[in-house]
Structure formats: structure tokens, C-alpha cells
Amino acid sequence: MANHSPVEIDPKELARAEGMWGSFTKLIKWSIIASVAVLVLLAWLFV
């Protein structure tokens, strides 16, 4: 069953989670940019 009592927030854990989320969003941004660049390059080469 779920625990409905309030949870204490550890500031160190919160900072680690925010840093991990920031790293994840940067990785996704550059992955999308790289994917678009590859698709544009392939379109340019084969069209």
C-alpha cells in the first residue's frame, strides 16, 4: 500500500536529481540536433 505520510526532502538529494535532469535535457537536445544534422546530410547527398 502507498504511504500517505509527508516525506522529508533531502537538499543534497534534490540537488543531485536537478543536476541529473539538467544533464538529461542537454543530452536529449544534442541528440535531436545530431539526428536532424544526419537526416539533412543524407537528404542533401541522395536528392
Image (cartoon, rainbow, N blue to C red):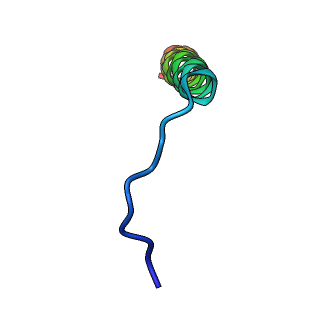
> Residue drawn at (63%, 22%), measured in percent from left and top?
12
Q: Is residue 24 left or right of residue 7?
A: right
Residue 10, x across and y down, in percent? 56, 31
> Residue drawn at (53%, 14%), measured in percent from left and top?
37
Residue 25, x across and y down, in percent? 50, 23
> Residue drawn at (52%, 22%), measured in percent from left and top?
18
| Outermost bottom residue | 1
* On screen, residue 30 above or below 5: above
* Viewer-nearest residue: 10 or 23: 10
* Viewer-nearest residue: 4 or 42: 4
Residue 22, x across and y down, in percent? 52, 18
* Viewer-nearest residue: 3 or 40: 3
Residue 19, x across and y down, in percent? 59, 18
How many numbered tags mark residues here? 0
* On screen, residue 11 above or below 9: above
